[in-house]
Image: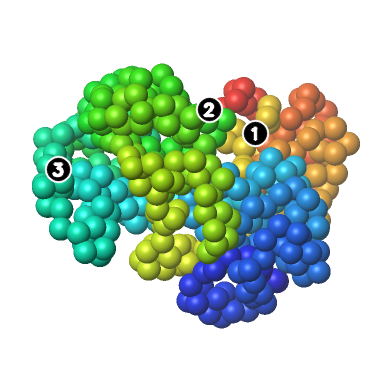
Amino acid sequence: MQVLLADKLEDRCLEALRELGLTVHNRPELKEAALSEALSVLNPEILVVRSTRVTAEMMAAAPALELIIRAGAGYDTIDVTAASDRGIFVANCPGKNAVAVAELTFGLILALDRFIPENVLDAREGRWNKAAYNKGRGLKGRTLGVIGLGHIGREVVRRAHAFEMPVVAWSRSLTDELARELGVARRNSPLEVAAEADIVTMHLAATPETRHLANRAFFEAMKPGAYFINTSRSSLVDEEALAWALEHRGIRAALDVMEGEPAVKSGSFAHPLAGHPQVYFTHHIGASTQQAQEAIADEVVRIIKTYLETGHAPNCVNLEVHSPATHLLTVRHLDKVGVLASVLDEVRRANWNVQEMENLIFAGARAACARIRFDGRPDEAVVQRIAALSDVLAVSLIPLEPSKPE
């Protein structure tokens, strides 16, 4: 089996994959047309990427492709719909860079509060300007607003507690019980968080629902002079609204992600807010610590190893939570060649569309139990024909509740 690594990963990842007997193509320079060409030529079963975009056309260029792994948490750079249509698993590595991003978030908060970049720049250029930089507000007792409480958001909350900061938070999944467990005050909307916090930090995935969540109304709700941090995805922020907030609300911002950021590791950079004195930019380095990269490399290996051994992809993001199956057919049978083939032949003749299927083997490998979830009209005659098959021990058919697992 072939694996194409189309982004830079730790050497430990390459070595571990080769130890699994895989043919590994380490091509971190591949982007766009070059990646499409490599996929066409190599036709790998597994593709691993970090920030590289993977399109439907790229998937079509590699008919053997079975699994795409995003070596990170967010997977908005992958056309997941196209992958699902082609039966390709898409997996990610959630939580492995959470500490790194949380650490950068607090680094940016401290930088804003103590004017650290300006301090360093003045000192390097021979200017002593203590009077300009001795008015940091301090973090203790200031309210931190956290929008999104996944792995990263929770790590940010832990660090906020160490700084003795009260935390207000919003997340779609946040309940009163979980809020008490995390030590945060739950708010009903991002606007409520924005209105109450001295510092707001974003930790959400990029989805159609979260696009421009930080919009004009959001920034209007923020306190004058508050800090705004985004280390998640640029699409969360309406940058025109942010520009307005800088001028009219005195907001100060630190962004690790921005619209139109370069896709290359080094090169020229231009952005409408790049020279603004109230904005700090970093180079999309949230996950870029040695610890995080090693953890992600290990997770990539674990996903691939598990997939090879079981056929299941851990952290798969594009499987239906509940299939459209309407009935469960259970067939207890002797563990012999051809039994399941005969059962499935009857299922096909009945025009039942199999949605999920498993076959469990009992101790001693003399008997097994096949569980087949299908979408179709029940037919007792079909059940009786299956029950009459040679080596079938018993058959049952029960309806499934709509949109719920059995």
What separation in Å lies between label 2 and label 1 (alpha carbons)?
24 Å
Residue found 48% across the figure and 76% down from its top? 12
Judging from the image, what secondary structure is the residue with disc 2 in? Answer: loop
Residue 169 spot, x, y in % from top left: 29, 30
Look at mark 1 in the image and give the residue it sits on.
323
Q: Is residue 356 left or right of residue 274?
A: right
Spatial separation of the CA atoms under disc 3 and disc 1: 55 Å
Residue carrying label 2: 209
Residue drawn at x 55%, y 62% as measured from the top left: 267
Q: Nearer the viewer, mark 2 or mark 1?
A: 2
The answer to whether mark 2 and mark 1 are in CB contact below 8 A is: no
Crowding at label 1, few (<14), some or many (≥20) Cα neighbours within 10 Å? Answer: some
The residue sitting at 32% across, 40% down in the picture is 278
Circle 3 is placed at which residue position? 136
Image quadrant holding the C terminus, namely top right
Q: The residue tagged with tag 3: helix, strand or loop? A: loop
Which amino acid lies under the numbered mark 2 shown in the image of this protein? Glu
